[in-house]
Amino acid sequence: MTTRRRIGLAGARRRPSRAVADHGAPKLEFTSGTPYDDYVAAEALHGLQRPVTDLPEERAFLVTTQVMELYFGLIRAEWRLAQRLLDAGDVVAATAVLARSVRYFEALNASWAALSWLTPAQFNSFRDALGEASGFQSAMYRHLEFLLGNKSEPLTRPHRRNPRVYQELVAALRAPSLYDSVLALLARRGFEVPPAGDPAAEYVPSPLVEAAWVRVYAEGGPGEELWTLAETLTDLSERFSDWRYRHLMAVRRSMGAKPGSGGSSGLTWLERSLRRDVFPELWSARTAM
């Protein structure tokens, strides 16, 4: 493990002697800021809330949205790590990383509960002040969709005015998805799957892939690495569908069927996305088993 920066002087060998010297009491004096703030950057983090109104409802909305953004970034990092491990053939390690991300999605999905109290009247009290700002414009969320194989070049366009973000999104669009890496792994293991196509194109389900998953389940079982990978991907797909559903219900509850702030049809757009399964053959294979 590489240490990029050192926070304070504490180490495993020093902790016991310090605890004895301080009679078990926490350290209260520091020469500068606390090591906690040095590490977490709590002061900077709390300075990122800049509501555009004085309404407490807006602050709650903003904080919850920022928490979601942090989870998007964490999940993207984990999926990219899992993808590298899959490409290297380390299925067990990749599956462990993906299983962690399932837990992150559970926490992410629970974030919607923090806004379940938001009525249309309360949302309307600050919605106009947000202008055209919309969660649809989240670049980090778009990275997650692209990693799952939901590719769309037009959805990179809102970010053209931000060169760094736009270039990263275009690179993600053109790179193989997480599911592409899974299917490449199956091919290396002797399963018949379609040859890799244009990674920038939206994924299209294949009967060959469905048959491959049927075989994985027929030949494997609990503890077998491909079987466990399949179940973990199914968990992930289910949690992602939960995310979409909770988003849809939050919109229905707070604004009904009004048009979205970013110009979309609101509920209709979200309902359409909810109908698209992630890793679709893992679901259709269950009918064929």
Image: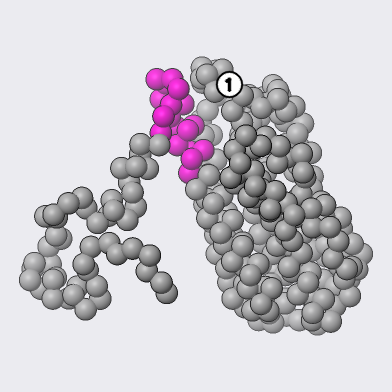
Left/right of residue 33 with respect to residue 132 in the rendered view: left
Is 54 included in the stretch rendered in magenta? yes
Furthest toward the front, the residue is 163
Q: Quadrant of the N terminus?
A: bottom left
Left/right of residue 278 with respect to residue 5 in the rendered view: right
Question: Is residue 27 shown above or below 213?
Answer: above
Is 237 included in the stretch rendered in magenta? no
- Amino acid at dot 1: Gly
Furthest toward the right, the residue is 207
Residue occupying the point 58% across, 45% down: 164
Q: Give the camera-side residue of 245 and 135.
A: 135
Left/right of residue 274 with respect to residue 249 in the rendered view: right
Percent coordinates x, y for residue 127 in the rendering: 55, 21
Percent coordinates x, y for residue 69 in the rendering: 53, 44
The stretch of residues the image draws in magenta is 49-67
Left/right of residue 99 with respect to residue 289 in the rendered view: left
* Tag 1 residue: 131
Q: Give the camera-side residue of 163 and 34.
A: 163
Percent coordinates x, y for residue 9 in the rendering: 21, 67
Q: Give the camera-side residue of 152 and 36.
A: 152
Percent coordinates x, y for residue 224 in the rendering: 69, 82
Q: Quadrant of residue 207?
A: bottom right
Question: Is residue 189 shown above or below 115?
Answer: below
